[in-house]
Amino acid sequence: MHAQSIETGAPQQVPIQDAESPLDAVHFVEPVGQDSLVIADGAGRLALFVDGAYATDLGEQGRGPCEHQSILTTSRYASLLFALDRGQQRLLAYDSESGACLGQIQSSDLRRTTGLASTESNLFLARGQYTSQTEPDTPLFFRVEREQEAEDEPAEGSVVVETSFTLADLDPLSFPVPLSVRTPVETHGASVYFALPLSPKIIRYNRETERFSSFEMDLALPASSEVESLSEPENILPIVESDIEFVEHLHVTDDHVVVASRRGTGADAVWRVQVYDHNGTKQAAQTVEHQIVHLTGAHIMQLVTEETEDAVYTISKVPYALP
């Protein structure tokens, strides 16, 4: 049985106004309020926009304490925004309203982290770069316990995790060279969900039972025969640009797991959204025209790069209905 198309409504256009220092290409978008967005750009900035107008930068760029250079991914809890600077092996906490840096974690364990999710008391970080040659006891993700100085006060620091989690049935694609990709991670209820890189699997870790489960998505990946023919690393690029469908965004509701994926690169990329139930049954799917920069249970947020005199970028919030 074929999955039905996703029903969408009229999009809301949010023009992003020029700041004093214009954005250097939109890297990704993190909603932090009803009308507020944090945008990471290609130069390493984290900029807060309210109603499409520039408000402030979050933190400062640099190598000093509580500074970042390039943000790979972010996660939000309440007014806190957590950001991963993998190059500096640093995890930072920002106040998403004032932009102030509240604290940081420095750890060599962060050098291969590609995904981040947050709860009231924990941060969950997924590690990428998995192939069939990865040792089975390599930590798949790990947990950071957050410390709060007082009730209802923002967290100002954390302790580096000592508890690692592993997964026996990795079953990743047998790529000869690991690919470094951003891994979407989402928490919902007592579970943590993430997409295993180079695999069609959505992994679920139940924090209460400490057990893993998974289901497989409809995801385009190269055949084993194609991978086996790749004798040189430079031969991988054409496969990446055409044959691998990467999961870019993940959202979990009480009844659904929503996945946004990309196949190809640049203007030739094909984006689509798929909806599954928690047992892995595909319920709906839709190919979309523009780059997806964020996904919620109610909106597909896309980047429309139609430049005008007073707006460099436009974020399109497309409402959709779950089956």
Image: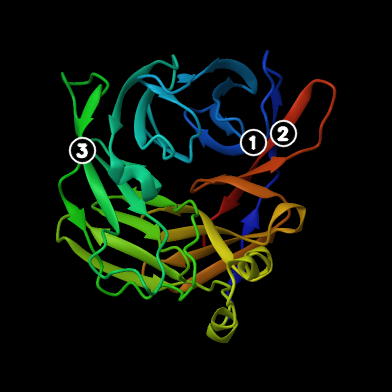
Q: Quadrant of the N terminus?
A: bottom right
Question: In the rendered view, would you say 220 is above or below 196?
Answer: below
Residue beneath the point at 80% across and 20% down? 310
Is residue 300 in sight in this rendering? no
Q: Are marks 2 and 1 in contact (CB under 8 Å)?
A: no
Dot 2 corresponds to which residue? Answer: 314
Is residue 107 in sight in this rendering? yes
- Tell me the CA gap for discs 2 and 1: 10 Å
Foreground: disc 2 or disc 3 = 3
**Image disc number at residue 160:** 3
SS at circle 1? strand
Front residue of 70/28: it is 70
Q: Where, by quadrant of the figure, is residue 149 drawn? A: top left
Foreground: disc 2 or disc 1 = 1
Residue type, label 1: Val
SS at circle 2? strand
